[in-house]
Image: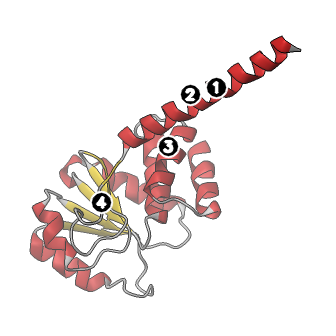
Amino acid sequence: MRNSVSTARRAVVMAGCAVSAVAVVLSCATSAIPQSEAPAGTVNYTRVDATVACGGATTPDAMAGLKQLGFVSVVNFRTADEPGAEIEASRAAAESAGLKYFHIPFRAPTPADAERFLGVIADTANQPSYVHCASANRVGAMWAIKRVKQDGWDIGRAMAEAETIGLRSDALKDFVRGYVAQ
């Protein structure tokens, strides 16, 4: 009995260590910037690595600040009918600031949306890129696909990072799993 208790305790301790190790890896994989340090006009800003940052709702006023941070392009997943999306004003502000602007609107993504995003994000002429939607939910989904398809990550690691970025929707998670399984 004593051996089974100590074996069970060891298993719990080892599981706790594994969870702690995953948390450290994830905190290193994405570097969430306090909103006070993020460009004005952005929400849920997360600097993922040297080539990309992700965010939620982003106003046209944010475009000049994104350019000052060194971004070359903006990828927007918002649809024109979303409250506050301001697609044309964002495009004009981005272009005025010297940013490339890619609008890939979707609520429920299609494989064509994912392919278009993968093409934009893989092109080094578009890096570093700022990718956004309304909350970072759709961004997290597309970023998980990018991690698996272009960076060779396993789906578990990619989904964990995507959730730190903002992926919450079960439907989007299902889309990611289905897409990467192809």
The earlier-in-sequence mark between 3 and 1 is 1
Question: What separation in Å lies between label 4 and label 1 (alpha carbons)?
Answer: 32 Å
* Quadrant assignment, res 98: bottom left
Question: What separation in Å lies between label 2 and label 1 (alpha carbons)?
Answer: 6 Å
Which residue position holds label 1? 13
Residue at 23% x, 45% y is: 50
Question: Circles 2 and 1: CB distance less than 8 Å?
Answer: yes
Q: In the image, residue 147 lies at what x, y percent? A: 44, 43
User: In the displayed image of the protein, which residue is found farthest to the front?
Assistant: 2
Q: Is residue 46 above or below residue 181?
A: below
Mark toward the viewer: 4 or 1: 1
Q: How is the image coloured?
A: secondary structure
Amino acid under label 4?
A: Pro
Q: In the image, residue 163 lies at what x, y percent? A: 51, 53
Which residue position holds label 3? 158
Q: In the image, residue 113 lies at what x, y percent? A: 46, 63
Amino acid under label 2?
A: Cys
Q: Which is nearer the eye, 151 or 53?
A: 53
